[in-house]
Image (spheres, rainbow, N blue to C red):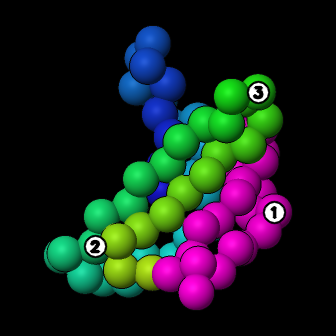
């Protein structure tokens, strides 16, 4: 997952999430209301990832099952 700056399109963060290589996989990421965390999930995985919005470092994986 990559985050680009809206101002000029430069790469801002790259989240350390491995690609699945599937053409059907769809990943979405959202900022939490305070702006400190990014929540990311995928349609082909049963896990939600929590990452630091400043560094992109993965903080925790939360299983959905």
Please report contact status of discs 2 and 3: CB closer than 8 Å, yes or no. no
- In the image, farthest residue toward the bottom: 65
Tell me the residue at 43%/19% (across/down).
6
- Left/right placement of residue 8 relative to residue 35 reads left
- For the residue carrying disc 3, how many other residues have a C-alpha within 10 Å: few (<14), some (14-19), or many (20+)? few
Residue bounds of the magenta highlight:
46-65
**In terms of depth relative to the viewer, which is nearer, 65 or 13?**
65
Looking at marks 2 and 3 on the same chain, the residue that comes earlier in the sequence is marked by 2
- For the residue carrying disc 2, how many other residues have a C-alpha within 10 Å: few (<14), some (14-19), or many (20+)? few
**In terms of depth relative to the viewer, which is nearer, 44 or 10?**
44
Secondary structure character of the magenta stretch overall: strand
Q: Is residue 16 above or below residue 55?
A: below
Measure the C-alpha gap from mark 3 to mark 1. 16 Å
For disc 2, the marked residue is 25
Measure the C-alpha gap from mark 1 to mark 2. 22 Å
Q: Quadrant of residue 15?
A: bottom right
Q: Is residue 54 magenta?
A: yes
Please report contact status of discs 3 and 1: CB closer than 8 Å, yes or no. no
Tell me the residue at 67%/37% (across/down).
32
Q: In front: mark 2 or mark 3?
A: 3
Q: Quadrant of residue 37?
A: top right
Q: Is residue 22 above or below residue 29?
A: below
- In the image, farthest residue toward the left: 23
Marker disc for residue 34 = 3
For disc 1, the marked residue is 59
- Left/right placement of residue 18 relative to residue 51 reads left
From the top left corner, tell me how far across and down residue 58 is, in percent: 75, 63
């Amino acid at each position: 997952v990559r985050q680009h700056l809206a101002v000029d399109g430069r790469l801002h963060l790259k989240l350390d999430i491995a690609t699945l290589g599937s053409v059907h996989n769809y990943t979405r990421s959202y900022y939490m209301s305070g702006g400190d965390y990014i929540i990311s999930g995928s349609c082909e995985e049963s896990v939600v990832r929590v990452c630091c919005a400043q560094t992109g470092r993965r903080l925790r994986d939360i299983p959905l099952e």
